[in-house]
Structure formats: structure tokens, C-alpha cells
Amino acid sequence: MIKDILVCLEGSPSTEAATRIAIGVARACGAQMAGLAIIDEPDIRAGTPTSIGGASYKHERDETLVADAKKLADDWVALFERRCRTAGVPARSLEIVGRPAESILTEMEAHHLTVIGRDANFRFETEEHDRKTLNAILHQAMRPVLLVPETTELELGHTVLVAYDGSHAAKRAITSFAASGIAQGRAVHVATVDDNGVLAREMSERAVAMLRAANVPATAHNIVSILSNIEALFKLAKDLGAGLMVMGAFTRGRLRELFSGSVTRGLVEQTEIPLYLQH
Amino acid sequence: MTYATPTWAVAPFVCYLLLIATLPLFFGAFWEHNRNKLIVAALVSVPVLVYLFGIRVGGGQMLLRTACDYVSFIALLAALFTISGGICLRGSVAGTPRVNSAFMAVGAVLGSLIGTTGASVLLIRPLLRANEHRAYTTHIVVFFIFIVSNGAGLLTPLGDPPLFLGFLRGVPFTWTLRLAAPWALVNGVLLSLFTIIDHIVAAREKRNPRRAAGISHFPASPNEPLHLDGAINLFWLLGIVVVVFVMGTYGTPLFGDSYLRSLVQVLGMLGCGALSLVSTKREIHEANRFNWAPIIEVAVVFIGVFITMIPALSFLGERGASLGITKPWQFFWVSGALSSVLDNAPTYLTFASLAVGVTNSGGATLSVENLGALAFHPLGQHLLEAVSCGAVFMGAITYIGNGPNFIVKAIAEQHHVRMPSFFGYTLWSLAILVPLFGVVSHIFF
């Protein structure tokens, strides 16, 4: 059962949704929460080509941006603590000065689950979008991540879809999800997409057996579809009314991802429901 | 053929320019301190000083002359910096496309009067403040760099440091006015293009309103009309123009000796700067965040530039046409291309010296010490026009091509304007400026 939830704080609407969902999970599991705000000083102060006479202006810029980032971090932490207090969930907060990906990965080790807004930008002072941090976390994290898009309903919902492809990451996702306590009281469905329906059925039933062994009853689905894997999974999630999808993250090597694309990346970019991901 | 200047003597200059361009990127924390900049400048200067005092005949004299140029150069920059730091544009105005275009147009003229750095620092904060409510402002700052921080400075030696270096080497004060046509073409086209783009962006903002993000660093102020504080500084600015013009035009008949003339010029410029300092209210300096750090940095870095460029300039003056760059359009593009990645002031002098060499290979006997003769030579004047336009205009191609580019970027980012990366900005320039410079090259060179 999850006892510690880490919420990565910043200012986007998806982090607002992530905090809401995290509070819901914490209340259901009796977990305590930690809010993490990051001041990305290394990226703000990073070296850059500077014209003659520009160094003092860069210094002034850096000081201002670091101070702004600190102030925003204070605001987010205060808001997080207020919300947790209102919800009656025990919480503490952290402010770390450092690179976002490294800071989050280090902090994740001490928590059972990390909740992140899908469109979170932890490098907001220097970048318009921050795919780099999320990519690093999803590729390197040893613990599960709950990724929450802005479009998430108020709560996780009563139906969970487990997308299972037989990979080690998918197996780890099922194991940690079954142990998390999130499955309690929810209808769990397992889907495997493959051109060979029999194979897909066998694979999904293996996942169902794994879940059953952990006292999580589940229903198997095999999907043979002319749609892409991503579209087929989204369609089934919609048909089932799923409020959460569970899957292994980046199950193929980066080189294969480069040439044949990544299902994880597609799901992360397009999902309208939270994703429970484990690398 | 034997030359007075050996090839190796140019190496410190090349090396130093590369260090200036790359050290802030790879060793930013090291480069932040002026003491470290001074150490680098001293280290690269050592071989040149050994060459000048130990090998080169008349090397000491060359160094003395260069030292005079350096002091005049820094005195002008310091005086303009002080005076422009005493002027503050206040009041609230909404950043509509018409207002923004007016800002750019004023900056395009002002740049030649108070220097592109002064005009940039004076106008960028009011412009950012006027546009604080807008969601998309990147294009405004990029065009500001194109127009006010670079293109504006072509008309007088006060406009851009390269032109003042030319002036110190004898190019008459009013000679740059002959560049009015390319100045008008470049700034006119950029201003028109900016107006169109800003109209399109503003219309898009109306259709899809999006809140501007970030913490505001502008003081809250009631609606007050736009006005100038510290207007007395316009008088001191006029003083600088008079000093520079009079010393450039009548300095020799009045004072004869070039060192005495330089001294009077420096004292005149510094006097104007000092008068600005004492006559400006403290609150204006505070509003402009005025401090000496930028000018100290410029002074420190340019010590190395001025020392190491001595053999480099004489090398180019001697080799001239043998280097293969002989036509005005070649001077325009090559001096421009180098100005875009190295600082444009030393690049200007480098190519002006090469122009002397090319002109001399046609039978003339010009000196790199006196660019005034080049400015009136039938071929030389075209080469110098090309170098002037290339160095001033193409300084806009990257953030490091001209001093104010990065200053404007840093101030904009401080106010949470999302500025393009180094390469992102260069893509803007390649798409907009390079075709425009192609037209300039075709028409004028």
C-alpha cells in the first residue's frame, strides 16, 4: 500500500489536476504527501554566448530569474500545504535548488509514488516547454509515476485499464500497481494489442493471473484492430469509461524508439486520463 | 615578397576573439569576473608586446598610438553610457502595433545620435512595459535588436563602436552620412515588415486571448502620458556631438599634435559624461539600474582587443589583395559574416586595414593609421562603405555580433519575454536579414 506520495509542484493547470488527484489517492490509501518545488538555478545560470559588455546584464538577469523562481516555488509550496491541510492529508514540502530531472529522480527514491502534471514545466524560467525533464524521469525512474493531464476528471474514476505488452516494465507496472492500493474498489481491465488475437488473449490472461495473485480481480481483453496501438488503447479506455491507464513506460530501447516510434510517448502526449507508468 | 609583419603575430588577435566568443559559453562563471577577463587579455597581449618591443621597428610608437585610440574609444563609450543612463522614458502607453512601430522608428534615428547601446537601453524597458499585457512579444524584441541595436547606428561615428574606431583613425565625422541610402533601405524594410508582423500577431492575440505570464518587475504607475525624465542629458549629448565633430574636423589646425588633440577630445567627452552624472537625479539612475559594471567590462576586454589587433591590422594592410578579397561586395559579406560572430568593432578595423592593402596594391600609398585617406580614395571609399555597412548591419545576425544585442536579450528575459536561443535567434536573422542584405549588396556594392 502506498504510504508516501511525492507531488512535483509548478504552475501549470496539469499540476493543479495532479495535486487534486494525489490528494484523492493519499486520502484513499492513508498516505502522507510531500510537495516538491524546484528552483532550476543551474539552467538559469548556464553559460551562454555573451557580447562584450553583456556579462553584468546576464548576471542581473540571472539574479532576477532565480529570485522569481524562488518566489514562485514559495507560492506553490504554500498553496500545496494549504490544500493538503484543507483535505486533512498529512503533508510536508521541499524546495530544492538544482536540475529538475536529477532532483525529482533523487527524491522519487524516497517515495512510493510520484505524481506529475503531464504538461508540467519545471524549467519555466528558461524554456517554453519542458519535455526533457519528463523524458528523463520516465526513462530512468525506478519507482512508478502517475502522470496527470489537465483534462483529468475530479477523481480517478472506478475503472482502470492496464495496457500489457509482456515486457519487464509492464510486469513491474502491474506488480507495483497491484501493491499500491489504488486498484481497491475499482474495476480493472487488462488489454493486449496484437495482430494475432490468440497471442494477445494469452498475454492479457497472464497479466490477469498476475493481478489475481495479488488479490486484484481483473478482466482480460485482446485487441486486434486496424487502428494503431495507441488509438486502439484509447478507444477501449473510452468504451470502458476508464479513468486511469496502467502501463510499462518506454519498454523498448531508445534506438528502436527513434526508428519505430514509441507507444509510451504517443500515450503520454495524447492521453486525457491519468497514466500510471513504470519503467 | 617579404612583409614586415610575420603571420604568427596575428595569432593572439584571432585567439583572443575566439576566446571572447567562447569563454562565456563554456566557462561562464570564470568569464563573469573582470579580473579574469583582464588576466586573459594580459596573457594574449604578452606575445604581441614582445613582438612590438623586441622585433618590430617602431613598435613602441604603434602601441602608443593605439593606446590613444583606446582611451578615446572608451571615453566615448563611457560618456554615451553615462548620458543615456541619465535619460529615462516614463509613463504608460499601450503596446499597440502603431505604438511599437513608433518606438522602432524613434530608435532607428536615436541609434545614430546616442549610440545603439544607449538607444537600446533607453527604449527597451519602456517598450517591454508597454507590451507587458501582450502574450506574444518575442518578435518585438527580435526586431528591436535588428533595428535599434544595429541598423540604427550607421549614420554617425557615435552610432556604433566600429564607426567611432574609423573616426579615431581619421574618417571624417560626416563621412558616414553618405550611408544614408542603405540605412534607410534596411531600417525602412525592417520597420515595414515589423509593422505587418505585429499587426498579424496582435490580431491573433485578440482572437485567442492568452494571459501574459510571469512576475512583473515594472513599478505600478497610474496612467500618465509618456515623458522624458533627465532631459538635461540631451544637452550633454549635444556636447559630445560638438566635441567629436569639432575635434574631428578642426582638431588638427587647432591642436596640431595628434596626442594633444586626443587628450582634448577625451577630456571633452569625459567632461560631458561627468556633467551628466552630477546633473542627473539619483532616481533616474536607479530606474535605469545604472551602474558601471558594463563599461568596466568593455574597458577591460578591449584592452586585449586593441593590443592584439596592432600586428593583425598591419598584416592585412601589407597583404591586401593577395588575400583574395578585393571587391566591395566581398568586403560587405566577409566583414559582415565575421562581425556576426565576433565583435564588430575589431572586425571593422581589420577589414578597413585590408581595404587599405587592396587599395595600395592598385598603386596607392595609404596607411592603416589614417583611414581618412581611404575614405576619399576612388576605390577605397567603396570598400570602406562596404565594410561599414557589413560591420554595422551584420552585427545583428547573432546575439554576440554587437554589444547591445545580448543586453536587450538579457533585459527582455529578466522581464519574462521568452527569447529565442542563440541558434533560434540566428534562424530569425537568416530568414529576415540575410535576404535583405542580399538586396543591399546587389544595389550598393
Image: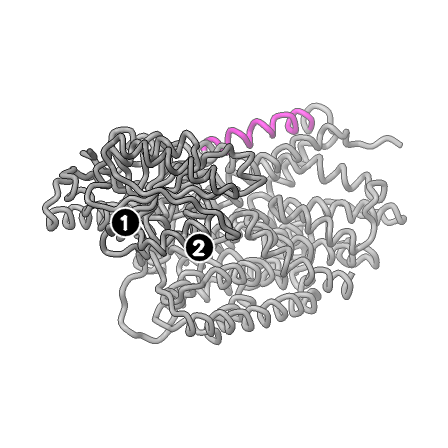
Residue B288, above or below B110: above
* Badge 2 element: loop
Q: Quadrant of residue B56?
A: top right
Q: CA distance from mark 1 to mark 2?
A: 41 Å
User: Label 1, on which residue?
Assistant: A159
Range of residues picked out in magenta: B35-51
Q: Which label sits on residue A69?
A: none
- The answer to whether residue A35 is left or right of residue B98 is left
Observer-nearest of A141 and B318: A141
Say which amino acid is labelled 2: Arg
Residue B412 in the image: state x and y as whole percent: 43, 55
Vertical arrangement, residue A72 with respect to residue B310, above or below: below
Q: Quadrant of residue A204?
A: top left
Subunit bearing disc 2: B
Secondary structure under the numbered disc 1 in the rendered image: strand
Q: Amino acid at mark 1?
A: Thr
Residue situated in front as seen by the camera: B272 or A8: A8
Q: Position of residue A255 (x, y in %)?
A: 56, 34
Please name which of the two marks, 1 or 2, marks the residue nearer to the observer.
1
Based on the picture, tell me whether residue A84 belongs to the magenta stretch: no
Q: Mark 2 highlights which residue?
A: B418
Both marks 1 and 2 on one chain: no
Q: How is the image coloured?
A: one colour
Residue at the spot 73% in from the left edge and 64% down from the top edge: B439
Q: Which residue is at a point 54% across and 62% down the rendered structure image? A: B143
Quadrant housing the N terminus of chain A = top left
On screen, residue B432 above or below A19:
below
Pinpoint the chain carrying mark 1.
A
Q: Relative to residue B220, is residue B4 drawn left or right?
A: right
Looking at the image, which residue sits at the far front? Answer: A198
